[in-house]
Image (cartoon, rainbow, N blue to C red):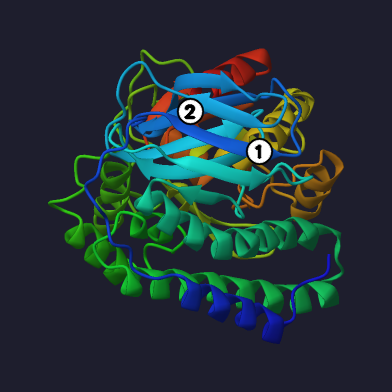
Amino acid sequence: MKFTPLSILFLTMAAGILSIGCADFGNNVPENAGTISGNLTGVDAGASVILRSFKNGSLVKVAEGKTTENGDFFVTPEVPLERGFHQVIINKSWPVVLITDSTEAPNIQATIPAENRYLHEARIEGSKESSLLAEYYAVIMPLQDSLVEGKNALRSLSNEQKMEANKDLEMLIAAIDKTSLAFIKENEGHPATLAALEQLNIEKHSAAYKSVLKSLATSFSDSDYYVMLKKKYDASITSRTIPNQPPPNKKTNRKNGQYAAGDEALDIVMADPDGNIRKLSDLRGKVVLLDFWASWCGPCRRENPAVVKAYEKYNSQGFEVFSVSLDNNVDRWKQAIEQDGLVWPNHVCDMKKWGNAASNAYGISSIPHTMLIGRDGIIIRTHLRGPALEEELEKLFN
């Protein structure tokens, strides 16, 4: 993995900040209002173009179209869009986010990249809020991609190489923070600043969360995306944290686990294999599979390929895995992560086997045990294994 040198990184960041400015929003309603159109270069005719709306912590499909031979597409939802965050995704691989409603007619011009990644170079017309958001993503998404690649590459490095790589990762995080904070400052009161909030650590940048949410409290508070981030901010103020909180009351009518669909997921604060503290609450805004497992658990190891497949398919769309290991041998734990190809960064363990603080608080009596958690921190479903996990993710993302 080759990291961006610091000088180039901050030149890129600075150029991005200078190119992002305030938008002036008009009130003219175009004749084709409510239709999202565009032209895509590098995609075959008949490619699916799905429009999804952000609702109740998930992306909900509202319309679908197909590309023509020259890459044109038109998507018109039957129910008029409400003002908020929406996503267009091409062939389930290349997403782009819009802030729009039924009074606008956004037009997307983009070239499809080789990798399954966000279309950060898309040009958007007909929706000034979407255009402003696209300018921000054009700067931030390449940095985010480098950060994810860097974290995934750490496991194959020696300890000496990890020290240098971690310095580069810290630079990337600093660049993401600085870019996002600058965007928020330059565009106060615009909904696109909510996207910048999601890039920031809520505990470190609580003041930014408070400021943005306050600035949009009257103009955008009805949107689901605002509500989701507001819940995340409120939860950070009154965090329910393991192991500082008392164990919950026993719910004996539930098999293996005291929490079920509809319950709010407890936070988990625990160390990863490198000694870094990771928090489940830091993944608010993502769909998360909370996976209790162990290197010594045969059924867990046999289930891992299904989780890896799901991660590879849906990670680019906002799916994460938070793995809690009930190991008591750090070397075996690390070896199992590498052998099974568990490339996501969120692995935690306190080396207490069945005395694990997280599994005890959740009332876990057997593993593997999984919980699918929505973007709002509410448990969607439990005991998901194999095809059941794939089916649930298919409903959420497609």
Q: Which mark is residue 40?
A: 1
Q: Position of residue 138 (x, y in %)?
A: 57, 60
Q: Residue furthest front?
A: 31
Quadrant for the C terminus in the image: top right
Residue type at tag 1:
Leu
Image quarter for residue 40?
A: top right
Q: Which mark is residue 51?
A: 2
Residue type at tag 2:
Leu
Quadrant for the N terminus in the image: bottom right
Q: Position of residue 229 (x, y in %)?
A: 32, 49
Q: Say which label, 2 or 1, has the lower sequence index.
A: 1
* Distance in Å between CA atoms under marks 2 and 1: 15 Å
Asked whether 275 or 77 is in front, the reply is 77
Asked whether 91 or 377 is in front, the reply is 91
Asked whether 236 or 269 is in front, the reply is 236
Q: Is residue 37 left or right of residue 216?
A: right
Q: Position of residue 233 (x, y in %)?
A: 28, 55
| Callouts 2 and 1 close, C-beta under 8 Å | no
Q: Which mark is residue 128?
A: none
Residue located 43% across and 43% down the image: 98
Q: Is residue 33 left or right of residue 122?
A: left
